[in-house]
Image (cartoon, rainbow, N blue to C red):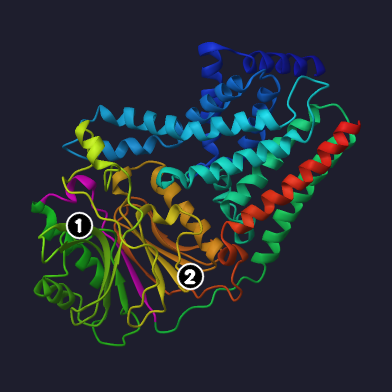
Amino acid sequence: MKALFLNIANKLKHLILGRGWRGAIFYICLGAVTSFAFAPLNFFPIIFLCLPILVKSLDYAETGSRAFYVGGWFAFGMFAVGLYWVAYSFLAQTDVPQWTAPIAVMALAVALSVFVALSFVVAHKFGRFGPFGQRQPSRIIIFALSWALFEWLRGHMFTGFPWHQMAHVWSDTPVVMQTVSLLGSYGLSFLTVLVAASLVLFFDNKSTSRRAVMTVSLVVSIAVVGFGIIRLNGAEVSYYPDVRLRLVQANITQLEKWPREFWSRNVNQHIALSVDGTNAEEGADNSPTHVIWPETAVPYSLHSVEGVRSIIMGELGGNAHLITGVPRVDRDGQTGAVRLYNSIIGISPQGEVEMTYDKFHLVPFGEYIPFADVLGRLGIGKFVEGEVGFTSGPGPQTLNLSGLPSFSPLICYEIIFPSSVRQNNNASWILNLTNDAWFGDSFGPYQHFAQARFRAIEEGVAVVRVAGAGISGVIDPWGRVESKIGLFQQGYLDASLPKPTVSQPLYSKLGDISFAFIIILSLIGFAIIAKREEKQ
């Protein structure tokens, strides 16, 4: 058995030391395997193998460029496989060449990989990596810190894309997920990398600092699980009385969403699902008070066409409010300039627009062109249908609609940004409308839905999510899925609206300040352990 173990260790060392294309293939495969830890597979145990291997790889990295090589190829494999679903958005269009789909996935993977590669360079420079006898256990803390810090940068720089955070490997483990109520997803990423990477210390030489780091990792593990158990114990959901929501998922494919010949059919499908099985009498127990349609469910502007609004509300029976996604057109009265918004509107039973929300975090190259003047000269335009780009809204808002507690509306991927989903923490719940038909029958909609669960826990409020052809559902303030409509299922869901947690989560109050606190605390711990290592 010992001989077999040594043989495996020697072969692994040979792979870790690989150069050129052989080494690249090894680290790409390692990253690809790591992507299995995320939704919908959720095979999180794999990180307890892959992250220690990465630490060993940095031990054998003589230079910062080698560290960049290791981190870059690993991240490329993780993002290229984990985000393969981006290609579906190109295949779901008729006026975009399909051959651009794999190029777009590779380009996105390369861009995101730079952040991980740089985190490896920083860790290698400031951590105490090296061959046996020179490496120090404190390097695990620096490795985890660098990983989490560059995750934060990836979530904020260049409009941000905080997908595949290491915290997301726990998206189907509510006990562990509860930690984000204190530290947010970036904080949980740090703790996850710290614990998983510390397993490599079993192969280090014995020392006081080794025992210290392993003890810290053990304490962190117990604390995270214990906190989750305590927080979930007795976490009973209470509901707003007299609020009955109907979530409508018409399951309309992207190819049939925007062509004009399908407009009437698509809207009628939403109407049919909205009234199916209901009693039109006002106050009937099975009659919804608010019907919710997904992002751009109505493919034309409703603000200036009162007659159409009245027809739609009349078809709904005249008792319920309607919340729906629409494209909103705004024309400047003086210049005649036209601005297009990706919006949510709330309509009263009488057909009046009671509230409007405009999406503020737009998708680069999908909804608008960054640096449009410069890139336009280079012939680079939007990668999705439509010649006119959207205009950004003013930012997160807390809105009100008759019969509902205040809420924070979010469209599509606005839900993936921690600490940016509620204005002044005044909203009692979060509404997320999306159109995941872009991403077909892939991992994308599952990962998108999983991130909504993290926002519920961080903010301590329910998340109501309505998708065009994705996954719709109600998530309680502890991140538990109360009910849902599955991917590519047509139907509706009648649900009550959960109230927020009694006490507001720490992360909801402080935002990323709580993440900064744990970073400072960890740096202090690193300094103490490093000083002890110098004396050994």
In whole angstroms, how far apart are the C-alphas of marks 1 and 2?
A: 27 Å
Mark 1 or mark 2: whose residue is earlier in sequence? 1
Q: Position of residue 393 (x, y in %)?
A: 31, 61
Q: Position of residue 52 (x, y in %)?
A: 68, 31
Q: Magenta stretch: residue 69 in it?
A: no
Residue nearest the viewer, comparing 180 with 45:
180
Compared across the picture, whether 193 is left or right of 26 comes to right
- Quadrant (top left, top right, bottom left, bottom right) of the C terminus: top right
Classify 463 as above or below 204: below
| Segment tinted magenta in the rendering | 243-259
Residue nearest the viewer, comparing 189 with 257:
189
Q: Magenta stretch: residue 250 in it?
A: yes
Q: Residues within 10 Å of mark 2 (few under 14, many from 20)?
A: few
* Tag 1 secondary structure: strand
Residue nearest the viewer, comparing 505 with 275:
505
Residue at screen point 28% across, 44% down: 366
Compared across the picture, whether 231 is left or right of 533 comes to left
In this rendering, does residue 214 appear at all? no
* Amino acid beneath label 1: Leu
The residue to which callout 2 is attached is 424
Classify 506 as above or below 289: above
The residue to which callout 1 is attached is 340
Q: Contact (CB < 8 A) between labels 1 and 2?
A: no
* Amino acid beneath label 2: Asn
Compared across the picture, whether 426 is left or right of 221 comes to left
